[in-house]
Amino acid sequence: MLRIENLRARVEAREILKGLSLSINAGEVHAIMGPNGSGKSTLSYVVSGREGYEVTEGSVTFEGEDLLPLEAHERAARGIFLGFQYPVEIPGVSNLLFLRTALNAQRRARGEAEVSGAEFMKLVRAESALLDLDMEMLKRPVNVGFSGGEKKRNEAFQLGILQPKLAILDETDSGLDIDALRVVADGINRFRSPERAVLLITHYQRLLDYVRPDYVHVLSGGRIIKTGGPDLALQLEREGYGAIAA
Amino acid sequence: MTLALPSPREEDWRWADLAFAHALADTSPPANDPLPDVAGHWLDLDGERRLFVAGRPVEADIAAPEADPAAPAHPLADHAAAVARAGTTLRVDGEGGLLQLLHVGTGGAAHGVTRVVLAPGAHLTLIETFADADGDHWLNHRFDADLGEGAVLNRIVRVRHDHGLVTDRAFARIAATARYHQLLVGMGQGVLRAETHAWLSGAGAHADVHGILLGNHSSAQDILTRAVHRSPNATSDQKWRLVAAEQAKLSIAGGVMVAQDAQKTNAEQSLKALVFHRTASANLKPELEIFADDVKCAHGCTVGALDKAALFYLESRGVPPAEAKVLLTRAFVADALGAVDHEKLASLLDAETQAWLATAAEKRA
């Protein structure tokens, strides 16, 4: 589904990704772990198309299509979703208006019919109930006044409504207490299917207790230096990144 | 009457562009024959409508009102009072409903006066729209309002002219517990100078002086506001949102004046501008003169571009850039629209601003 080969990317003059390769197939859950500054968030931004990240070498393809010439919204319409480490607050734009605009823009781009207000609200009610989100909160401006946990649940809510093919979840577990972590992890597990894939970016092993990955990669110095199964995460937790990178 | 136009060397007029007033002050407008097509300028709302073309009433013979003698001297407003041949006088006792006045410039200099007197407890919603047919002109308007105790006046000012100059000087005297709500929406490509002087003259009096200026092409819109707290325990709020694109020049000098005995004043002011192109400009000038010591006066002032992190967040969910910019800009101006408590009117104004923003975004794309 996603194939990254020898990817080099920089922000301004600084090279962050230095020859990263990664393949993710449909149905798989991958976790990328790594110390601060190893390039985890940069990878998520390069794949999702954020401005200011320049690819100098290598390729990124999604279902066989070259992703790099596409703008962020076009990648979203292809089925790529980025769950933000720090979801952005947008005063004045209601969560539901934003999400319906996004859903219909994606559907238009794919040549599908737009969803009506009634259909959309049906989706919203079903998904918000699963995530224990209050409807009143969803009508409020995007993420404004939300607690850290509410922001992450809102990301999981958007994931559930937009139903992408690949979810890249950047530090989804940060700022969550145990109960909220379980709710968000349940959301991710519901999303898992043989047609879809998940890339979890995380510092800690904790999230992986709830969302069991098929592969764990260690990112260090802008490259993947080790790949293994779920046990690798436990090893990292015990021994630290230093021992693995050495 | 000889007109002495103010000079840009005077601080209150530094951003005003009065070139059309200089050029056209002594020029009479053409006859209203035929009448320009103005149907598109009315808002689709129930209520009486009055049309003035080049300062002359259409389908009515309405003499110019007496100006409010309490109003401070003003070169343009005083000239309008002296030379206007027609205007509107509204004396309201009780529920006055909704009324639309449409002022259309066609050429030369045209003057008009609107005078509102609300009895205690009276209520009126007045929409004044300034528009034009094609061709340069100067439309000079004066608005005097006197709100009795507990009265409520909503004044919506829509500025939609694409040529020439519109000048409007509004003066409102607001008695105890009366409320004056003014919202100006400027979206024309012509030149505008609009002033509002709201005098809060009793305990519990309140004034909203809000506005949205949307400027593209070579639109030049210049605003001056004065929330004048003349007695204790009154409140005022000013929210202005400016969106400057292309070669637009948008300016506001927003004033809060608190007299020495106006203790317990609570005044807020928020001036914000978005500038989309290097060729566009926005000037924001908060002016606070506070002579009382027990007051709350909050003010904030920012000029900038759209938040890039917010744009990427929307785009990463599939919203195309042009649509994302419209959503964010609409949210930016929504603060100022939020104060309109007439549901249909609010939604019509929201729709016009949104249409303007969508067109501007298409041009940017």
Image: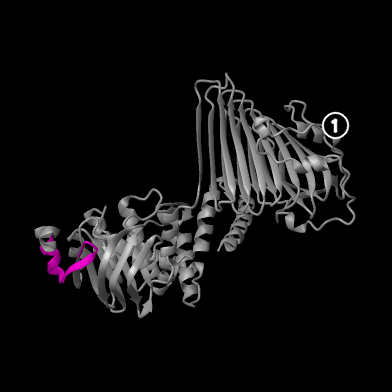
Residue at 41% across, 68% down = A123
The answer to which of A13 and B165 lies nearer the viewer is A13
Left or right: A135 with respect to B249?
A: left
Give the quadrant of residue B183. Answer: top right
Provide the residue designation for mark 1: B2
- Give the percent coordinates (x, y) of residue A211: 22, 67
Q: Residue furthest front?
A: A13
Residue B258 in view in this figure: yes
Q: Position of residue B106 (x, y in %)?
A: 82, 51
Q: Is residue A234 left or right of residue B58?
A: left
Residue B284: name its quadrant: top right
- Residue appearing at x 63%, y 46% in the figure: B249
Q: Is residue A226 magenta?
A: yes
Would you place residue B59 above or below residue A40 in this image?
Answer: above
Residue A184 in the figure: left or right of residue B247: left
Q: Specify the quadrant that holds the N terminus of chain A.
A: bottom left
At which x and y percent is residue A215? Answer: 19, 72
Q: Position of residue B18 (x, y in %)?
A: 74, 40
Q: Is residue B181 magenta?
A: no
- Farthest residue to the bottom: give it: A64
Q: Mark 1: which secondary structure?
A: loop
Give the residue drawn at x 68%, y 37%: B195
- Subunit of label 1: B
Instruction: Point out the image quarter for the C terminus of chain A.
Output: bottom left
The amino acid pointed to by label 1 is: Thr
- Asked whether the viewer can see residue A127, the reply is no
Q: Is residue B330 above or below residue B290?
A: below
- Crowding around mark 1 (Cα neighbors within 10 Å: few <14, some 14 to 19, many 20+) is few
Where are the magenta residues, as a range? A219-236
